């Protein structure tokens, strides 16, 4: 279970020096620091369950979500998330894995996010269509439909069969929320396919 320093101090109010007690629990392997002020009680907790607590507001997206939905064949080692209203990218190396965060436009941020409950944890993740749009937003502008197809199916290695099962209306709606030449081209390409 995720706990903040404040939560732990409140739980240990019977101790004269609760911060010393927290340090001992860490040394004994009963408490695991994630980032400053944030701890986990179970060392086996998968990192994706912690991503939203480390830096927020945020939701899992980009390569992590593409792999989660089996759109790309790679096993992703980094928990990549989208965030909003941050001036810079953030990256945290922790005992639970590497977590990266990057901005998406405020207009696009709330669309296409699912809340997933897993045991005592919950996390936010982009749906498959939104993850593709988030990923395309982060890439340099693309100027041709052929170049876009190469980007999607060769460079990103998105599985064409899985891609065909996605909802094109969602893809078009999400793509329209970004100010991106690549996503404008993506919308035109989708319209030509339909």
Image (tube, rainbow, N blue to C red):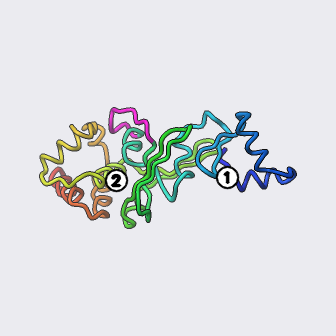
Residue 110 visible in the snapshot? no
Q: Position of residue 56 (x, y in %)?
A: 52, 57
> Left or right: where does residue 1 sit relative to residue 122?
right
Q: Earlier in the sequence, mark 1 or mark 2?
A: 1
Q: Position of residue 4 (x, y in %)?
A: 67, 52
Q: Residue at x 55, y 44 (%)?
A: 49
- CB of mark 1 within 8 Å of CB of mark 2? no
* Residue that carries the numbered disc 1 in the rendered image: 4
Q: Nearer the viewer, residue 185 or 172?
A: 185
Is the stretch drawn in magenta largely helix, strand or loop?
A: loop
Q: Secondary structure at mark 2?
A: helix
Q: Position of residue 31 (x, y in %)?
A: 70, 40
Q: Position of residue 88 (x, y in %)?
A: 41, 59
Which residues make up the magenta segment? 69-78
> Left or right: where does residue 66 sit relative to residue 161?
right
Image vertical order of residue 189 relative to residue 76, above or below: below
Q: Secondary structure at mark 1?
A: strand
Magenta stretch: includes residue 99? no
Q: Which label was assigned to residue 134? A: 2
| Quadrant in the rendering for residue 95 | top right
Cα–Cα gap, marks 1 and 2 = 30 Å
Graded by Cα atoms within 10 Å as few (under 14), some (14 to 19) or many (20 or more), the crowding at tag 2 reads many
Q: Which label was assigned to residue 160? A: none
């Amino acid at each position: 279970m995720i706990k903040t320093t404040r939560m732990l101090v409140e739980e240990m109010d019977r101790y004269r020096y609760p911060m010393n007690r927290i340090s001992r629990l860490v040394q004994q392997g009963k408490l695991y620091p994630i980032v400053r002020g944030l701890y986990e009680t179970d060392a086996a907790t998968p990192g994706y369950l912690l991503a939203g607590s480390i830096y927020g507001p945020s939701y899992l997206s980009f390569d992590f979500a593409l792999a989660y939905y089996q759109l790309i064949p790679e096993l992703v080692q980094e928990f990549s998330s989208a965030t909003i209203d941050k001036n810079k990218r953030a990256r945290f190396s922790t005992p639970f894995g590497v977590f990266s965060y990057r901005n998406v436009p405020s207009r696009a941020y709330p669309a296409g996010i699912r809340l997933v409950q897993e045991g005592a944890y919950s996390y936010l993740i982009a749906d498959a269509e939104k993850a593709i749009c988030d990923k395309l937003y982060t890439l340099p502008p693309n100027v041709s439909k052929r170049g876009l197809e190469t980007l999607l199916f060769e460079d990103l290695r998105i599985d064409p069969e899985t891609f065909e099962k996605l909802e094109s209306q969602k893809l078009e709606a999400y793509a329209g929320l970004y100010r991106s030449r690549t996503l404008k081209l993506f919308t035109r390409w989708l319209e030509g396919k339909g």
